Image: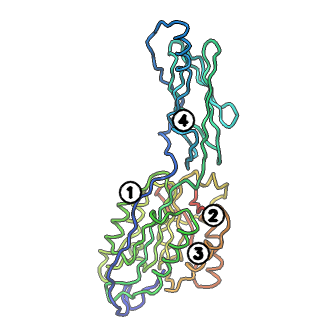
């Protein structure tokens, strides 16, 4: 977000050194949604053979009562919430006689039938991949025997985007150990405001927000490495950085400058290549990077102006790796107009769902009209973007 003032790329006035204090909140909270089973592209059934037993009429009646059932495996409860648009349904269907067919219904409409092979027995394990509509979905199974006997049961699967888990990594660097690097006055204050707005108005639980104040390079890399084992492919991740940035024209590489950066030694600078390597291995559903730093536009290998806007559900369904930056390859001031309007728009938003593209569009003109900055929005290339978008969900 900020320019380095002085002679040469990293020289500046002498200021006090940072203590390098890192504040981290990393406790994990169990998700309220039920995780789905692995996805398969086809219906599969497994016959479960039972030994033949000779019974009296009364015994047969008792056996019928016990065997005519649909036992749900996934979901395990009659009602479940999920942030997945696709759900792997698993159930065991049993009759007192040979099963002939199992019908699957979704929201009152016929979805698929499973023809049971003769001799497969009277108990069948069903696995069926279901594409859900946004909102509540009613899934019914109907088992039909060779004599026409029918049994049925249903479950309710609520496809709800707000049941997804949202993580955030907030990084603010304003105090530098090297006296030749200018200290800054605003990054921590800006990051504090950003923390408050996402934790109070959007679906970021405080225990899922990691806040690093004046971290070293090792602190940042260690936190990103730790998150590899924390987030999964159904989670969303927001990374926010405010601090010094530097662009090496000869190497065509941008850097973030942690608190232990030295002006004449790049060993503790954090290159964009390290960041994008971690974005590539953090297998989230959506990742959004917001960078308020000098030369922050260097994160883009190419910039993509805007996606073709679709419905929220379609944008959420496809994975995304997007970034919003305060500028291009230019210096930006310590007092950030970019962050001012970013927080203002997040605070004023009344919509249930706000995409990162809509957020950027709502603030871009205001930033340009009130500063020399030209903020940027685009896709971070080669790290898994498939055309979706990060969605802020209002609480």
- Who comes first in sequence, dot 3 or dot 1? 1
Which residue is at 45% across, 62% downward?
A: 208
- Who comes first in sequence, dot 3 or dot 2? 3
- Who comes first in sequence, dot 2 or dot 1? 1
Q: Where, quadrant-wise, is the C terminus in this rendering? A: bottom right
C-alpha gap between disc 3 and disc 1: 28 Å
- Look at the numbered disc 3 and give the secondary structure of its residue: helix
- Who comes first in sequence, dot 4 or dot 3? 4
C-alpha gap between disc 3 and disc 2: 13 Å
Query: Which mark's residue is nearer the viewer, 1 or 4?
Result: 4
- Look at the numbered disc 2 and give the secondary structure of its residue: strand
The residue that mark 3 highlights is 342
Pointer 1: residues within 10 angstroms few (<14), some, or many (20+)?
some
C-alpha gap between disc 4 and disc 2: 31 Å
C-alpha gap between disc 2 and disc 1: 26 Å
The residue furthest right is 108
- Who comes first in sequence, dot 1 or dot 4? 4
Q: Is residue 121 above or below residue 106?
A: above
Dot 4 and dot 3 residues touching (CB under 8 Å): no
Which residue is at 54% across, 35% downward?
A: 89
Q: Is residue 269 above or below residue 237?
A: below
Dot 2 and dot 1 residues touching (CB under 8 Å): no
The residue that mark 2 highlights is 354
Pointer 3: residues within 10 angstroms few (<14), some, or many (20+)?
many
Dot 3 and dot 1 residues touching (CB under 8 Å): no
Q: Nearer the viewer, residue 81 or 11?
A: 81
The residue that mark 4 highlights is 89
């Amino acid at each position: 977000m900020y320019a380095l003032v002085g002679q040469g790329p990293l020289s500046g006035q002498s200021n006090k050194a940072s203590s390098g204090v890192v504040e981290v909140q990393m406790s994990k909270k169990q998700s309220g949604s039920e995780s789905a089973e692995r996805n398969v592209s086809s219906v599969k059934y497994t016959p479960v053979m039972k030994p033949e037993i000779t019974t009296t009429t009364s015994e047969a009646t008792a056996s019928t009562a016990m065997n005519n059932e649909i036992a749900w495996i996934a979901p395990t409860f009659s009602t479940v919430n999920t942030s997945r648009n696709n759900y792997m349904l698993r159930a065991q269907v049993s009759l007192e006689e040979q099963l002939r067919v199992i019908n699957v219904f979704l929201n009152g409409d016929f979805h698929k039938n499973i023809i049971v092979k003769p001799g497969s027995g009277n108990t069948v394990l069903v696995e069926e991949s279901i594409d859900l509509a946004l909102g509540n979905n009613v899934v019914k199974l109907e088992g039909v025997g060779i004599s026409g006997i029918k049994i049925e049961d249903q479950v309710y699967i609520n496809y709800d985007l707000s049941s997804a888990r949202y993580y955030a990594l907030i990084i603010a660097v304003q105090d530098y150990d090297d006296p030749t690097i200018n200290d800054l006055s605003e990054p921590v204050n800006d990051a504090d405001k950003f923390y408050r707005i996402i934790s109070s108005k959007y679906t970021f639980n405080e225990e899922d927000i990691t806040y690093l104040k004046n971290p070293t390079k090792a602190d940042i890399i260690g936190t990103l490495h730790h998150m590899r084992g924390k987030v999964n492919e159904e989670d969303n991740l927001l990374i926010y950085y405010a601090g010094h940035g530097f662009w090496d024209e000869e190497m065509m590489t941008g850097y973030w400058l942690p608190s232990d950066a030295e002006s004449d030694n790049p060993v503790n600078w954090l290159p964009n290549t390290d960041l994008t390597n971690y974005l590539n291995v953090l297998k989230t559903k959506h990742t959004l990077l917001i960078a308020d730093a000098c030369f922050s536009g260097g994160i883009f290998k190419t910039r993509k102006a805007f996606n073709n806007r679709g419905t929220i559900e379609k944008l959420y369904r496809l994975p995304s790796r997007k970034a919003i930056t305060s500028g291009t390859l230019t210096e930006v001031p310590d007092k950030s107009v970019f962050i001012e309007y970013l927080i203002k728009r997040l605070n004023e938003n009344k919509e249930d769902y706000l995409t990162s593209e809509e957020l950027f569009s709502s603030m871009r003109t205001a930033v340009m009209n009130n500063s020399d900055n030209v903020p940027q929005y685009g896709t971070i290339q080669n790290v898994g973007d498939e055309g979706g978008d990060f969605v802020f969900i209002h609480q």
